[in-house]
Image (cartoon, rainbow, N blue to C red):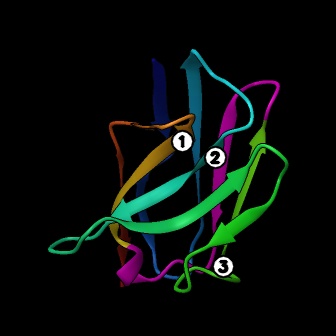
Amino acid sequence: QVQLVESGGGLVQAGGSLRLSCAASGSIFSPNLMGWYRQRPGKQRELVATVTSYGFANYGDSVKGRFTISRDNAKNTVNLQMNSLKPEDTAVYYCNCAQLITNYWGQGTQVTVSS
């Protein structure tokens, strides 16, 4: 089992920045894929960004150029720096860890961007 604990959500004005952090603990194997997904009101959960154990990152089209994902393998943490936030970025953001054949999810953290 893997436990994921997110932090860093909150309320910010459009154009502002937030940094989300996720700490993983438990039975963590390498390689794995860690990342962030979000669920906007009335929408399905969607990819924000993922990063492999080797540092290869992938971003959803709507956040490219504004968000940056990073990870620290020694600390089992993954961070998401969100800049130039827009009201449409308002969502619950979920940390994810995919290893072997299992997906693990955090409890989610709310990000609200006011216009």
What is the quadrant of the N terminus in the image? top left
Which of the image's four quarters has the C terminus? bottom left
Callout 1, which amino acid?
Ala
Nearest to the eye among marks 3 and 1: give it.
1
How many angstroms separate mark 3 from mark 2 (CA)? 21 Å
| Amino acid, disc 3 | Arg
**SS under mark 2:** strand
Q: Amino acid at mark 2?
A: Leu
How crowded pointer 2 is (Cα within 10 Å; few <14, some 14-19, many 20+) is rated as: some
Q: Residue furthest front?
A: 101
The magenta span reads: 73-89
Which residue is the site of mark 2? 33
In the displayed structure, 103 sits above or below 57; it is: above
Label pair 3/2, CB-CB below 8 angstroms? no
Taking the spot 58% from the left edge, 15% from the top edge, the residue there is 27
Q: Which residue is mark 1?
A: 98
Q: Are the residues at dot 2 and dot 1 in contact (C-beta closer than 8 Å)?
A: yes
Q: How many marks?
A: 3
Q: Residues within 10 Å of mark 3 (few under 14, many from 20)?
A: few
Q: Which mark is residue 66?
A: 3
Front residue of 84/97: it is: 97
- Marker disc for residue 56: none
Which type of secondary structure does the marked residue at label 3 adopt? loop
